[in-house]
Image (cartoon, helix red, strand yellow):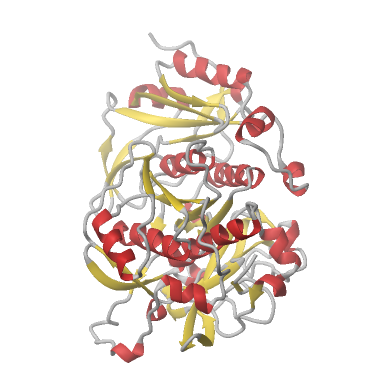
Amino acid sequence: MKPKAVKKVVLEGSEKSAPKAKLTGKVITGQLADVTIRIRRKESVEEAIARGIRLTQKEYDQMFGASDEDMKLVEDFASAHHLSIIDSSSVRRSVMVRGTVADLQEAFGVSLDHYKDKEGCTFRGRSGDIHIPANLQGIIEGVFGLDDRPHARPMFQLLKPAKGKIIAHAASISYTPPQIAKLYGFPGGVTGKGQCIGILELGGGYSTADLNTYFKSLKLTSPNIKAISVDNGHNSPTGNPDSADGEVMLDIEVASAVAPGASIAVYFSPNTDKGFLDAITKSIHDTTNKISVLSISWGASEKEWTAQSMTAFNQSFQSAALLGITITVASGDAGSADGESDGNLHVDFPASSPYVLACGGTRLQASGTKISSESVWHDSNDSAGGGGVSEFFALPDYQKNAGVPPSPMSKFVGRGVPDVAGNADPSSGYKVLVGGQSMVIGGTSAVAPLMAGLIALANEKNKNQAGFINPKIYAAPAKFCRDITIGDNDTTTKKLGFKAKVGWDPCTGLGVLQTL
């Protein structure tokens, strides 16, 4: 029996463009799918964050989780549409449901089709808006998982020969993560003991044998690592360094080598908007592992996200701020165009969230134990540090005196990206071990775990979780960062990009974060 017809309204921010992939037909209506329904907070959090309040998980749930009444209304709606509740969490403000495609289409007023992309990946896709009952307007803030297209890309780059040319060994430089930490003057006498670094992965996996070999080569003890499954994501190494394995191993090896005393929690989830969001909420509300910093090296241009996704992710990062968790995010590896082909400027999300530490890229050269030069990473249009001005998020208070320029396209003065930077150029990259192979990898993917390692060291040294550090470092940049003033990250065909300068810039932010 069909549920009684009710008035439905458009879910604000849910509009989505059709996938850039081959349409292969309708999805089988009897196929089962899982969806996460995101519910509003009891109260807004901005004032609490501005006051620097720190909360326990229980206190956060009581003050800012979803209300029992709202949860019940959403659960009743799901049941009325024959959707089973597979998980429900007020602190994550999420109700996870499972149902047939037919029931999900009916419940949310969407049409789901079947697609195949150029990599051969098949998925469900939709276009247009999601619809919800009028009585749930304002209560439901997002619906994720109806469309399960691959959503984000990892921000790592292998050092490879350029277009068939052999790169002479002397033309490139490489460093171990401890060498980078020493060159940058990271805190000594601490190892990150007592800290847990969370790492979010949307594919790939790690090999314990490789990790043991790698850390033995560095004369370090192998890290204590837990693989945590989110939405049936798993540690699934392929053995191919140029796959997502390269990202996973880079993240673990960099973070752990910088902070060898910290434990590591790796959250594996599918590469979908639902998987990404669920991994974020799972990690920051994980009362077992209790992470103090979360490293994210996956993202996509703001243009590729729905408003509901960016809002939901951003709200989760706000939650992390109240819980004293620092979020470090790679700013992208394709410069100011962020891989888009329209000739315009684009910034990467989730790096453009005002509540994360956005990590840009540099090229580092050293002589012995001293830095001889450091400039903006920019090798080519598809190998350069990401940065620019958000077209979605407003300029945060902490950047009001940073000199963030208006967007050259819209004149909107939005959130400036990145906040800080670090060595990312593959030609001055990190020595790692992936799939049994020693290699050099770069990318802002390396900077996010590098900064996560620094945060873990600082937390141990200061005997306090750093949490949301952006207001602190912008208030006294010279105290915490070394400015980078050479280079540019302009990869747009219209030449709209940016140059490094004294002070904050959309290439390397405030510079290299070295202490806290």
Q: Quadrant of the C terminus?
A: bottom right
Question: Between residues 210 and 312, which one lies in front from this camera angle?
Answer: 210
Q: Which residue is drawn at 64% across and 54% down?
A: 463
From the viewer's side, name the closer residue of 81 and 264: 264
Which residue appears farthest toward the front when viewing the image? Answer: 189
Q: Where's residue 324, x and y in %? A: 63, 47
Say which residue appears at 30% left-offset and 47% top-offset. 235
Q: How many labels does the image show?
A: 0
Q: Is residue 436 left or right of residue 266?
A: left
- Is residue 384 rendered to the left or right of residue 103? right
Q: Give the left or right position of residue 344, taking residue 419 as reference.
A: left
Q: Is residue 77 placed above or below 305 in the rendered structure?
A: above
The residue at the point 55 percent across, 84 percent down is 487
In the displayed structure, would residue 476 be above or below residue 23? below
Which quadrant of the view contains residue 511?
bottom right
Q: Is residue 490 visible?
A: no
Tell me what residue is drawn at x 50 percent, y 61 percent: 191
Residue 390: image x %, image y %? 61, 60
Q: Where is residue 75 in the image (x, y as percent from the top left)?
A: 51, 18
- Left or right: where 129 falls relative to 394: left
- Residue at the extreme top: 1
The answer to whether residue 239 is visible is yes
For the N terminus, give its image quadrant.
top left
Is 470 located above or below residue 47 in the figure? below
